[in-house]
Image (spheres, rainbow, N blue to C red):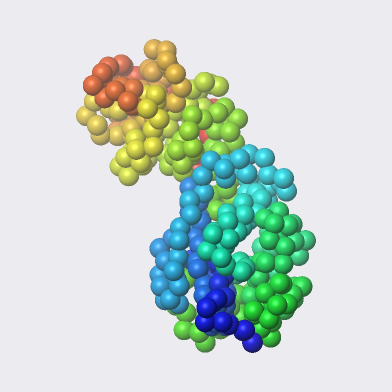
Amino acid sequence: MIQQSTHNPIKAVGLISGGLDSILAAKIVKDLGVEVHGVYFAMPWGCCDKGKAQSAAEQIGIPLIVLQLDERYLQVVKTPKYGYGSVMNPCVDCRIHMFTRAAQYMRHINAQFIFTGEIIGQRPMSQKRHSMRWIEEGARLEGRLLRPLCAQLMEPTIPEQEGLIDREKLLAISGRSRKGQLQLAEQLSITAFSAPAGGCSLTDSNFAERMKDTLKHGYRNFRETIALKWGRHFRLNPQFKAILGRDEMENKALMHYAHPQDTIMQLEDNLGPTLILKGDNPTEEILKFCAGLIQRFSRYKNETSVPVKYWIAHDQNTIKNILSVQLNETEIEKISIHNAS
Ligand code: SF4
């Protein structure tokens, strides 16, 4: 049983993804009398569900803070110590990074331990017994990382050894089946959670190719990598890359995330894809080619040539014009960077 003093409540930080497992873990720990503080990690390229994490936290009555993954996380993606999973997902290093940051928060609020909804054997890379140990060691959380859903299958953690948490009340779930968790959710009246996801954007091979291309050829700031999730991407040569929006939402998002030195290109009537050209001082040949890309993905696809306007992102007052060259499909296919997604 919990040995709780009214002056020093037992506190824990829980990683909340919006999925069922993390919220079940939070509910179990909270019901043991622990003051639970949730942390949601916002992945710049899309993963999990922030809205669901917030409503789940609200449903079980715990506070939730959102921590943004940033440039530091990109370093993890570039050179993961434990390598990649099936695509470009550095799951073990990713978890180490998140837990390291969650541990800083744990110390900041004087919490005694961290917990997560991880289940042994559920994920192929980060939820094997040995990788769970690497994660704990890598985040310097030895003995302070509790996995309530499978705790009885693991070595007792410090909060269990110290009697802060009753080990008997923790669970022994393992493997990929979700039946036990769904039954538990029903018993605990938990309804706010998202459907299980396969992984983040780094598990998507098309996104991964764009990320590899960006890491290989360089980027000016972290925001540029956020734009990898939108549009059609084309590598013109080592210095230049073009991205075209596929709809109005993507056009706006790409403009918003453009670097001040990027060249923005649009059809004169603004109807069609916005193109963001990355690279300094593009030649006329490059600009005409990019205008050709816009033409290809617009309703003027079959015209010989169309006028396109362009300007440097930081200077909307200096607009110039150029005529497109008509491109053939083979040329376009050759420079496409996995645009299926
Ligand atoms: S799937 Fe993505 S977010 Fe999830 S652990 Fe792996 S790298 Fe991290």
The spot of residue 22 in percent (x, y) is 55, 69
Q: Residue furthest top?
A: 284
Up/down of 320 relative to 216, above or below = above
Up/down of 103 relative to 158, above or below = above
Q: Which residue corresponds to the image point at 45% horizontal and 61% vertical from the top-left?
A: 65
Q: Residue furthest front?
A: 7
Up/down of 258 relative to 323, above or below = below
Q: Is residue 90 left or right of residue 292?
A: right
Q: Is residue 209 left or right of residue 248?
A: right
The quarter of the rendered structure image containing the N terminus is bottom right
Q: Which residue corresponds to the image point at 76% horizontal and 65% vertical from the top-left?
A: 129
The spot of residue 81 in percent (x, y) is 72, 45
Q: Toward the viewer: 100 or 181?
A: 100
Q: Toward the viewer: 211 or 33?
A: 33
Q: Is residue 338 left or right of residue 140?
A: left
Q: Within the image, what quadrant is residue 31 found in?
A: bottom right
User: Does residue 172 appear in the picture of this structure?
Assistant: no
Up/down of 173 relative to 18, above or below = below
Q: Is residue 153 left or right of residue 270?
A: right
User: Does residue 216 appear in the picture of this structure?
Assistant: yes
The spot of residue 171 in percent (x, y) is 66, 80
Q: Toward the viewer: 234 or 31?
A: 31
Q: Which residue corresponds to the image point at 59% horizontal and 36% vertical from the top-left?
A: 212
The spot of residue 193 in percent (x, y) is 47, 71
Query: What count of labels does the image hold?
Result: 0
Q: Which residue corresponds to the image point at 73% horizontal and 77% vertical from the top-left?
A: 161
